[in-house]
């Protein structure tokens, strides 16, 4: 996956035709190009402007392109007074007569890094400040960033098809929830948050029943979550997360072993239906609940 990323400004003897500046506006010249071009493509088959989570009707804000040859829509990135400026694009596979991409509508403070050492199928981006390519473009999954002064370097690809989770803040989750995409049986974990957020092993996430990726036009291997980071559990609390309680996608399942109910342990939760008997995710008899995240009910 990731060998290591080095900033192009410091680690590489740049090839002929490559322009790189930290003062003024510069671009990547003809590096990494072949005879090819990119055109805007609004085809719904690319799924660039559809919602990832639930029935919210919110769009991702991405734009589709089809490119021929080795051309990419984000290869014309520039640096203006040291600030990277460029589109952030994710590959969507063969499309029409070329390669499909989903890209940010506007330039960001991230630039495609065509000479980064990223193990295929990953490719490099260099960003300034707190920006992450995968937080700007939900079609991407990126490794932990490598800091180099004012810049952070990433190796990114379309969401990896292996058991694991990627934090995706561009998913249209309710305010107070974080979006995640997972493969296999993996569940989101706090230590998988990006380099610019908490990575503490004890960072606890409360996640709902998964929304299958296939239901929103994505890979059947993907599961999508909007998760809530609750405060530490009170001593003696007897309700725990039960992702496999059989609740509808997007609803939060709980297994309770004692007298507590989920709203008493997790205040933003509201459970409109009564409990039903079943098994916890760990295989123990418990009273199960299907609940909704409703922070406004606590105001």
Image (cartoon, helix red, strand yellow):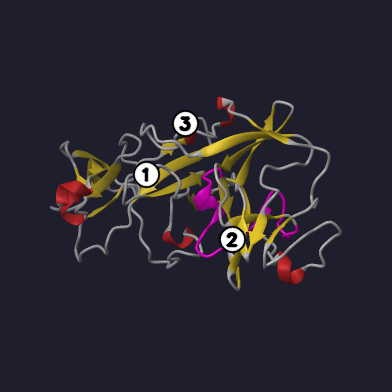
Return the residue at label 3. 216
Q: Can you tell which quarter of the image residue 36 is in?
A: top right
Task: Compare marks 1 and 3 and give the one earlier in the sequence.
Answer: 1
Mark 3, Cα crowd under 10 Å, few <14 / some 14-19 / many 20+, is some
Task: Compare marks 1 and 2 and give the one earlier in the sequence.
Answer: 2
Task: Compare marks 3 and 2 and give the one earlier in the sequence.
Answer: 2
Mark 1, Cα crowd under 10 Å, few <14 / some 14-19 / many 20+, is many
Which x, y percent locates residue 292? 24, 42
Q: On the rendered image, what quadrant is the N terminus found in? A: bottom right
Would residue 117 be visible to someone looking at this image?
yes
Return the residue at label 2. 127
Say whether residue 20 is left or right of residue 244.
right
Return the residue at label 1. 173
Identify the secondary structure beneath mark 2: strand
Q: Which sits in the foreground, 105 or 6?
A: 105
Say whether residue 249 is left or right of residue 180.
left
Q: Per the image, is 218 magenta?
A: no
Which x, y percent locates residue 72? 71, 43
Mark 2, Cα crowd under 10 Å, few <14 / some 14-19 / many 20+, is many
Which residue is found at the position 61% from the left and 43% from the top?
90
Which residue is found at the position 80% from the left and 50% from the top?
30
Which stretch is magenta? 115-139
Real-space Cα separation, disc 1 to disc 2, in angstroms: 25 Å
Q: Are marks 1 and 2 in contact (CB under 8 Å)?
A: no
Q: Which sits in the foreground, 22 or 115?
A: 22
Disc number lying in front (1 or 3): 1
Identify the secondary structure beneath mark 1: loop
Real-space Cα separation, disc 1 to disc 3, in angstroms: 14 Å
Disc number lying in front (1 or 2): 2
Which residue is found at the position 84% from the left and 60% from the top?
15
Q: Can you tell which quarter of the image residue 125 is in?
A: bottom right
Real-space Cα separation, disc 3 to disc 2, in angstroms: 30 Å
């Amino acid at each position: 996956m990731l060998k290591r990323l080095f900033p192009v400004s410091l680690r590489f003897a740049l090839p002929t035709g490559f322009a790189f500046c930290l003062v003024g506006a510069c671009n990547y010249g003809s590096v990494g190009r072949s005879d090819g071009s990119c055109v805007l493509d609004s085809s719904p088959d690319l799924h660039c402007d559809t919602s990832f989570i639930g029935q919210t009707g919110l769009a991702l804000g991405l734009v589709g392109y089809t490119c021929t040859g080795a051309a990419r829509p984000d290869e014309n990135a520039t640096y203006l007074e040291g600030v990277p400026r460029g589109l952030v694009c994710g590959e969507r596979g063969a499309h029409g007569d070329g390669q499909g991409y989903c890209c940010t509508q506007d330039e960001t403070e991230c630039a495609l890094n065509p000479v980064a050492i990223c193990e295929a199928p990953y490719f490099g981006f260099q960003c300034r400040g707190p920006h992450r390519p995968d937080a700007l473009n939900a079609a991407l999954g990126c490794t932990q960033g490598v800091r180099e002064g004012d810049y952070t370097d990433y190796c990114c690809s379309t969401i990896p098809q292996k058991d694991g989770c990627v934090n995706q803040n561009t998913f249209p989750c309710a305010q107070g929830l974080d979006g995640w995409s997972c493969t296999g049986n993996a569940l989101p974990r706090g230590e998988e948050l990006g380099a610019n957020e908490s990575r503490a092993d004890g960072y606890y996430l409360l996640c709902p029943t998964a929304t299958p990726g296939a239901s929103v036009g994505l890979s059947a291997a993907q599961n999508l979550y909007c998760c809530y980071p609750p405060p530490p559990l009170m001593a003696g609390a007897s309700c725990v997360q039960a992702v496999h309680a059989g609740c509808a996608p997007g609803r939060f399942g709980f297994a309770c072993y004692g007298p507590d109910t989920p709203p008493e342990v997790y205040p933003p939760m509201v459970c409109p239906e009564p409990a039903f008997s079943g098994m916890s995710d760990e295989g123990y008899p418990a009273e199960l609940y299907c609940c909704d995240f409703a922070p406004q009910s606590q105001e």
